[in-house]
Amino acid sequence: MTAGEGADDRWARAALSRLAEPTDRAVHAVIADHGPVEALRRISSGEGRWERFAERVRRLDVRRDAQIAATVGARLVIPGDDEWPNRLEDLPIPPWCLWVRGPLRLDEATARSVAIVGARSATSYGESQSSELAAGLVMAGWAIVSGAAYGIDGAAHRGALAVDGATVAVLANGVDRVYPAAHAMLLRRIAQTGCIVSEVAPGSAPMGSRFLARNRLIAAMTTGTVVVEAGLRSGSLQTMNRAVELNRPVGAVPGPVTSMMSAGCHNAIRKGEATLVTSAAEVVELVSPIGQGVLAEPREQPLPEDDLDPDTARVHESLPRSGGIDLDALLSATALAPMVVLAALGRLEDGGFAVKKDGRWRKLRRGT
Amino acid sequence: MTAGEGADDRWARAALSRLAEPTDRAVHAVIADHGPVEALRRISSGEGRWERFAERVRRLDVRRDAQIAATVGARLVIPGDDEWPNRLEDLPIPPWCLWVRGPLRLDEATARSVAIVGARSATSYGESQSSELAAGLVMAGWAIVSGAAYGIDGAAHRGALAVDGATVAVLANGVDRVYPAAHAMLLRRIAQTGCIVSEVAPGSAPMGSRFLARNRLIAAMTTGTVVVEAGLRSGSLQTMNRAVELNRPVGAVPGPVTSMMSAGCHNAIRKGEATLVTSAAEVVELVSPIGQGVLAEPREQPLPEDDLDPDTARVHESLPRSGGIDLDALLSATALAPMVVLAALGRLEDGGFAVKKDGRWRKLRRGT
């Protein structure tokens, strides 16, 4: 293919996803200024500042990339398409295009979505929390986005799939490639029921810098991000930081302070970067627009005695369960003023906490 | 004893600790307005609003209380004494006096002190954290104050004692009484090396309202408070709330979200009432005056590659570990401008990350 030949925007963007690494500033600038077709023409010229792309331009074959995509049933989504997640435009350097596999429409799947991310070397506690959170969020009507990596990511996808939920895997390699290899079955299931997404061309290998770029996509395309487990240097903390930069709500799950896999979460909570979350309901509260999804204060089933004011509680605790106590003895036991004690006894009697028999007061067991 | 007879301030306050329950508003007001001697005279009159104390006045015997105190080697500490912890004056209703046992001077022991409190029905995780925190704080020069209850309290005292640290037990009953009974040995050790404190007269039994009052003393006499484990209705949360009201720094230790014993801590962190703390060093940072005890950011031993800028990192990851790659191949592999690649190679060579041999570049293993 020579520069610009027959290239409409769509083909140009596909070609750029092969030529230029994600977040290449110069490429972003020329696309922004001149559109993808002209950008491709200039880059393909191999002249001046674009000389660095010469070798890649020589090898470029968009038709072959499109054929690979077709083989796995992948489609190309570009800005302006209905399926394009508009949240991606919040990024300083959005992807040139997305390659997408699977039956879900990406814009619809991500409209109400939570990124669940975390360490590859997760603990069983972390994996269990990841799956539970994902399933709980699905039940509340949210889709789960993650990176299909070992550990927290895989557990999040599985938790969503287990309750027939929508889940999106965003990869650092081409959507045709299976990485990690041991997640072949998981990726196949996601491709069958959810969505597999990548900004690099089909056939592309995962590389360190592409994981960093991929993390920003996860943060940008979701409503909010939750880190379940992360060491102090975990890549998932980069996803979290991208979400913070984009003003997306960010949660972190606490764990035992003895677990290095929770240290990144605890540190993020301490620094105010993440809100501590312990349940799907708390995540829903975090990612919901203000006034929606608001949680009741968590509490155990209250004992009715908890609602008593201090004086009434003191009178109540001075009452025997059997036998009974007369008013004078009660005044002495409580060292409260007679008016206070009498008022308290009235409240206790009204509330069914106390009963008077033969001039003597005793506690009443509630519910009897 | 009749009203005011031979009663100087000290005896009057001792008598009041027998007559009036802690935090009795009317008693506080009359002491504040007229001093303890006149307060005792009015209350002992049994007239008018003081009639409610008549029975207790009849039974009052300060000499006997003092004898009980002497038997266990307890002393009376009142406001104005050198040993009085001045922080107690921050309370809306300070104690009338304190009964104190043990070799430590209470003011000195509490000057740099942390309250470690939590659930009676703690988990082994919680007890372990409580002991570890206490020991770590002692090593950093802080005394440990707690309530000698089962669970987190007991573990905190034991953690301090295990490293020969200063520890103070604040009780809801007389300092002569052993409660809970199973902590007889623990209380004896605290009395031998630390301090046992109560605001109620010797011989007094523990009562629900006295635990609430005791909790406020723990919060008030310490520099800050840490909750290690707490159910959603744990009494230790009251201690925490008192500390919040007094503007004392408050920390809470996270734990597994599956543990109800950590639910109170997580809730307090979520509500912004407590700062998440995972180590003694973080507690020291929390309770230290601003600018002291500040922590370095926690991080794992960094790999040197972490300090590379993105372009240099991309060049570095494109270098083979053996053999080598020439500049043209590197330009193609990285799709970076020649100037950028050359600058990156210079940085990598200077940093000992890369080496050039026969015109080909390869990674250098650091430290070799």
Image (cartoon, coloured by chain):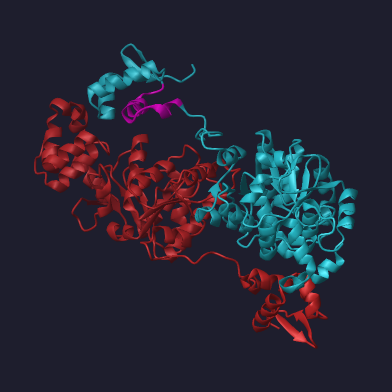
Chain colours: A red, B cyan
Residue at the extreme bottom: A358
Q: Is residue B307 above or below residue B29?
A: above
Asked if the stretch drawn in magenta spans residue B305, the answer is yes
Left or right, B55 with reference to A77: right
Residue beneath the point at 78% across and 69% down: B53
Q: Nearer the viewer, residue A19 or B32?
A: B32
Q: Residue A62: name its quadrant.
A: top left
Quadrant of the image containing the C terminus of chain A: bottom right
Can residue B175 be seen here? The reply is yes
Q: Residue B3: name its quadrant.
A: bottom right
- At which x and y percent is residue B324? 35, 19
- At which x and y percent is residue B276? 54, 47
What secondary structure is the stretch in magenta mostly built from?
Answer: helix
Can residue A2 be seen here? The reply is no
Q: Nearer the viewer, residue B4 or B367?
A: B4
Left or right, B122 with reference to A124: right
